[in-house]
């Protein structure tokens, strides 16, 4: 007994692209395209109507992009496999697709066999990312993790340590900071050492770069 074909909805705002995807996917009998959408709103309607196994979404479409469609589907509890098809290999796009609940991300220049393989993988419950995109995803995840670590270290600073940090980054001396904050230069030095230890930064140049990159501002002084 033959297996039922994988039922797919395609969403792309370019007719010729949709026709090309349909032609590739319906090569053979393993996949059946049950609907085509020109924008995200139409894609949602078709998924709700046909309940396909997989939806192939262009990342950029009128009304609602592919990532937004994926978020809505996941918020509704839909179990449809979501495959993002995009011309963008920027790691931020890939990371956003993962956050949106996509099961796969492939580029529009993939070969026919690989596109069919991606649909089959997503249908079977596996994630699918082409090797180049997987590398980009790894880079993006590392960057996000580092940002989280930096923010966590910043959050660990006390208000007084933040006050000292922004003044050190501004180029002020320990004595100038002490006079402004009404504490001793020795206390300023202690706070400075603690800031460097918590942030894992050992130079004034590094502290200055951190303050600029993280947008650290002087907290309101305690009354």
Image: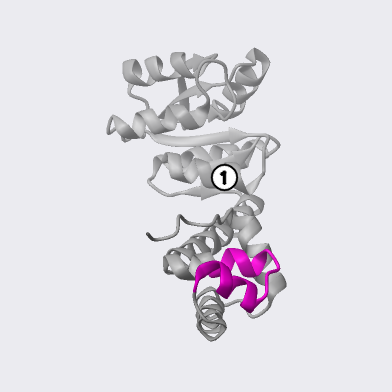
The structure residue drawn at horizontal position 63% and vertical position 70%, both measured from the top left corner, is 168
Residue range highlighted in magenta: 164-182
Left or right side of 45 for 215: right
Residue 33 x, y percent position in the rendering: 48, 21
Identify whether 140 is placed above or below 190. Answer: above
- On-image quarter of the N terminus: top left
The kind of secondary structure the magenta stretch mainly shows is helix
Q: Residue at x 55, y 14 (%)?
A: 38
Q: Is residue 116 above or below residue 60?
A: below
Where residue 64 sits in the image (x, y, percent)? 50, 20
Question: Which of these two is toward me, 11 or 4?
Answer: 11
Front one among 32 and 119: 119
Residue at the farthest left position? 77
Quickly name the residue at label 1: 94
Q: Quadrant of the C terminus?
A: bottom left
Q: Element type at marker 1?
A: helix
Q: Residue at x 51, y 28 (%)?
A: 66
- The way the protein has been coloured in the rendering is one colour
The quarter of the displayed image where residue 106 is located:
top right
| Residue found at x 44% / y 39% | 100
Quick check: is 166 in the magenta stretch?
Answer: yes
* Quadrant of residue 101 within the rendered picture: top left
Q: Nearer the viewer, residue 112 or 90?
A: 90
- Residue 188 lies in quadrant: bottom right
Reply above or below: 182 against 61: below
Above-or-below relation of 199 to 193: above
């Amino acid at each position: 007994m033959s297996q039922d074909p994988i039922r797919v909805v395609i969403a792309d705002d370019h007719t010729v692209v949709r026709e090309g995807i349909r032609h590739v996917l319906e090569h053979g009998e393993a996949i059946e395209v049950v609907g085509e959408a020109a924008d995200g709103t139409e894609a949602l309607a078709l998924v709700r109507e046909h309940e396909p196994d997989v939806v192939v979404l262009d990342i950029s479409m009128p009304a609602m992009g592919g990532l937004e469609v994926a978020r809505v589907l996941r918020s509704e509890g839909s179990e449809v496999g979501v495959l993002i098809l995009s011309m963008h290999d920027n790691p931020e796009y890939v990371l956003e697709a993962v956050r949106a609940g996509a099961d796969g991300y492939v580029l529009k220049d993939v070969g026919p066999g690989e596109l069919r393989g991606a649909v089959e993988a997503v249908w079977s419950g596996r994630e699918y990312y082409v090797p180049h995109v997987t590398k980009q995803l790894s880079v993006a995840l590392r960057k996000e993790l580092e940002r989280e670590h930096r923010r966590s270290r910043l959050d660990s600073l006390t208000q007084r340590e933040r006050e000292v940090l922004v003044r050190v980054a501004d180029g002020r001396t320990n004595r100038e900071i002490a006079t402004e904050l009404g504490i001793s230069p020795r206390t300023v030095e202690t706070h400075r050492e603690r800031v460097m230890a918590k942030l894992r930064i050992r130079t004034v140049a590094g502290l200055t770069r951190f303050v600029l990159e993280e947008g650290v501002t002087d907290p309101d002084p305690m009354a």
